[in-house]
Image: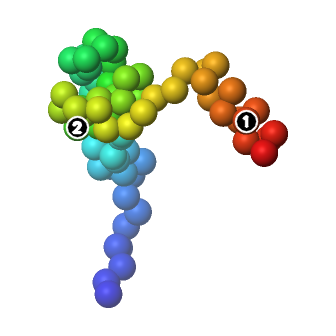
Amino acid sequence: MPNPKRRHSKQRGRLRRTHDKIAEVSLNACPQCSKAKQSHKVCVHCGYYKGRPVISVLSLKEKKQERENKRKK
């Protein structure tokens, strides 16, 4: 495989890398709870996706109670 005859300048390398940046995540409003969520993902606040409940979302108090119940058993 051939090698370059001359060194590429810093500017040339940096110009090539200008397109390698990470894109920002686009957020939409959830139709159920109207909080920000990623498109095509389950809402982490209410657990709905496409108008249907997919996961059950517990409040912090409920999670704490479940942990305590598991420890008692």
Which residue is at the far bottom?
1
- Of pointers 2 and 1, the one earlier in the residue sequence: 2
x 55%, y 21%: residue: 59
Is residue 72 left or right of 53 when viewed as pictured?
right
Which residue is at the far right?
72
The disc placed on residue 18 is none
Q: Position of residue 67 (x, y in %)?
A: 71, 35
Looking at this view, is 45 or 6 the one in front? 45
Quadrant of the image occupied by residue 6: bottom left
x 31%, y 14%: residue: 33
Label 1, on which residue?
69
- Neighbourhood count class around disc 1 (C-alpha, 10 Å): few under 14, some 14–19, many 20 upward: few
Q: How many marks?
A: 2
Q: Secondary structure at mark 2?
A: loop
Is residue 72 left or right of 59 when viewed as pictured?
right
Quadrant of the image occupied by residue 62: top right
Q: Secondary structure at mark 1?
A: helix
Query: How far separated are the C-alphas under marks 2 and 1?
Result: 34 Å
Looking at this view, is 47 or 66 the one in front? 66
Label 2, on which residue?
40
Colouring method of the image: rainbow
Assign the N terminus to one quadrant of the image: bottom left
Q: Position of residue 73 (x, y in %)?
A: 78, 45
